[in-house]
Amino acid sequence: MRWLYIPFLLISLGWAQKVGFVDAQSILDRMPEYKAAEQDIERLTQQWQREIDEIYARAERLFQEYREQEPLMSPEMKRRKQDEIEAEERKARELQRKRFGPNGDLFKQREEKMKPILDKLQQAIQAVAQERKYSIVLDRSAGGMVLYGEPAYDLTDAVASRLGLR
């Protein structure tokens, strides 16, 4: 249990680290390039969802046709029509997985568009922290669990200013 007292000993010996915090999301929300990237991603998402919805709608139309014509179909015709419907549904699911899956196109686009913006933010945070001699900077917006922070240690405006934002 003696190890619990070590941080307090370090602080009392003058080895305390200066800790600040930022609200990274509020900074990002002020960045025009972040807003543009979000809009591009939203446009792509809507476009891809429309493509998927069209395939599902085509499968639904095929199914409705099948139901209407089923009494008149031979077993072979039924099987072919069912296979056609299943193929359309499979095509829609595969496209949905390709676009929105864990490593899908949306993930890749988000990473491609956001990485330069997040790198720029990170560099600004690092520069402000180094200028002001902060050892640690927490992100209040990313679940950093900053329940309270003395306003003097809030670096949000300084980082925004460094990025040329109001």
Image (spheres, grey):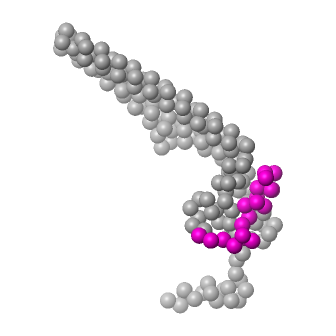
- Frontmost residue, 30 versus 108: 30
Residue 21 position in % (x across, y down)? 68, 66
Q: Is 40 rendered above or below residue 34?
A: above
Q: Is 43 rendered above or below residue 110?
A: above
Residue 146 position in % (x across, y down)? 60, 68
Q: Is 158 rendered above or below residue 89?
A: below
Q: What residue do we see at 30% from left, 18% from top? A: 64
Position of 78 with respect to 129 (left or right) is left
Q: Does 88 lie within the magenta span?
A: no
Q: Bounds of the magenta span?
A: 147-166
State the image quarter where residue 71 is shown: top left
Q: Does 153 lie within the magenta span?
A: yes
Q: What residue do we see at 71% from left, 56% from top? A: 122
State the image quarter where residue 79 is shown: top left
Position of 107 with respect to 74 (left or right) is right
Residue most toward the top? 72
Residue 52 position in % (x across, y down)? 45, 28
- Frontmost residue, 44 versus 7: 44
Residue 84 visible? The answer is no
**In the rendered picture of this protein, how many numbered marks are placed on residues?**
0
Q: What residue do we see at 68% from left, 49% from top? A: 29
Q: What residue do we see at 47% from left, 34% from top? A: 98
- Frontmost residue, 80 versus 140: 140
State the image quarter where residue 83 is shown: top left
Residue 78 visible? The answer is yes
